[in-house]
Image (cartoon, helix red, strand yellow):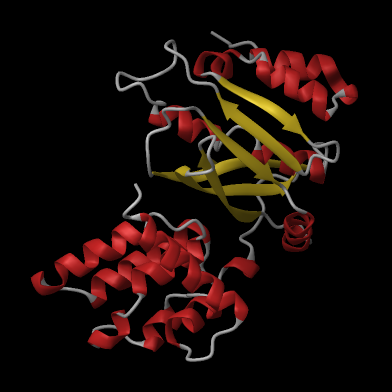
């Protein structure tokens, strides 16, 4: 039996070319899945570059502990980012969807939560450059959900797949073959840390690395947290780091006595994450 178009698609099609940020916000806020979860979009910028979602927690959408469902928090990261990207690129020229995603639950969202989403000029320029010539690209994106006091409730990592519309399946993008980022960078850091800290004598240290890494926001900072001090044990080498495709800024943060501002920023994020272990 052939399925009809979704509720959201019917409304979007009805709006047609007159779809504005404010009109789309109302469309999505009438979409039953978001209504049922208590998620509302409270802002979409006129140029489609920014958006904000809020979770209004009530007795009807809280879990048995009086906190937000984990699936609801994860859903917040997958509502708006791809839509903003497509609107900025032109929905008649590009299509995008989430390819992979993960979520770190840091603390319960008992007072509600919010997420601010950005599709920056730099991001759009990167996508246009990487898809020139008919290629697809994968854009890593980090979503930070906070409570009303600004404390981190959870951190989502997504890979958004973007390609020109109407050309079929594009060839592999050569720009993405020589380095890792996003989810792949986090996985590389985790794997190298487990290789470098093998054995029961390192189990406690490895656990500490994991606890710190999951509280870092940027994938680059997570890689630094996983690999901090691992080279000292000699089981993995600097050549292994480069062979795994770690960005130079990550290697610099791990090895340099005079790191750049970008590398120092990664170190500072790891320090903040370690200190947060005592808060939540």
Horizontally, residue 244 falls left or right of residue 47, namely left
Residue at 47 percent across and 35 percent down: it is: 74
Residue 96 found in image quarter = top right
Please determine whether, in this image, residue 151 is positioned above or below residue 174: above
Residue with the most extreme right position: 18
Residue in front for this viewpoint, 170 or 206: 206
Q: Nearer the viewer, residue 103 or 55?
A: 55
Picture layout, residue 243 above or below residue 122: below
Q: Nearer the viewer, residue 166 or 50?
A: 50
Which residue appears at 76% of the width and 19% of the height?
12
Residue 166 visible in the shown view: no
Q: Quadrant of residue 64?
A: top left
Q: Residue 160 placed where, x, y %?
A: 60, 47
Furthest-bottom residue in this view? 257
Residue 145 in percent (x, y) is at: 52, 40
Q: Residue at x 65, y 12 (%)?
A: 7
Would you say 5 lies left or right of 125 here?
left
> Can I make out residue 2 in this image?
yes
Horizontal side of residue 38 vs 239, given as left or right: right
Q: Position of residue 4 (x, y in %)?
A: 63, 10
Q: Position of residue 107 (x, y in %)?
A: 37, 40
């Amino acid at each position: 039996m052939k399925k009809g178009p979704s509720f959201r698609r019917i409304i979007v099609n009805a709006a047609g070319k007159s779809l504005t940020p404010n009109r789309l916000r109302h469309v999505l806020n009438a979409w039953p899945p978001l209504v049922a979860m208590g998620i509302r979009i409270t802002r979409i910028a006129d140029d489609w570059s920014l958006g904000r979602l809020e979770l209004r927690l009530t007795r009807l959408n809280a879990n048995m502990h009086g906190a937000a469902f984990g699936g609801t928090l994860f859903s917040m990261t997958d509502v708006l980012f791809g839509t903003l990207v497509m609107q900025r690129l032109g929905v008649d020229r590009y299509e995008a969807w989430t390819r992979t995603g993960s979520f770190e639950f840091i603390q319960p969202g008992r007072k509600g939560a919010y997420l601010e989403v950005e599709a920056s000029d730099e991001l759009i320029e990167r996508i246009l450059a990487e898809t020139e010539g008919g290629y697809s690209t994968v854009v890593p994106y980090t979503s930070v959900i906070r409570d009303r006091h600004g404390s981190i409730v959870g951190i989502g990592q997504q890979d958004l797949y973007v390609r020109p519309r109407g050309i079929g399946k594009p060839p592999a993008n050569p720009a993405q073959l020589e380095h890792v980022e996003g989810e792949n960078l986090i996985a590389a850091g985790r794997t190298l840390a487990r290789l470098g800290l093998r054995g029961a004598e390192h189990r406690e240290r490895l656990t500490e690395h994991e606890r710190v890494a999951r509280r870092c926001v940027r994938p680059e900072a997570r890689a630094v947290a996983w690999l901090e001090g691992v080279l000292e044990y000699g089981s993995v080498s600097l050549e292994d780091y480069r062979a795994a495709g770690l960005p130079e800024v990550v290697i610099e943060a791990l090895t340099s006595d005079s790191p750049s501002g970008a590398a120092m920023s990664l170190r500072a994020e790891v320090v903040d994450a370690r200190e947060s272990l005592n808060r939540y």
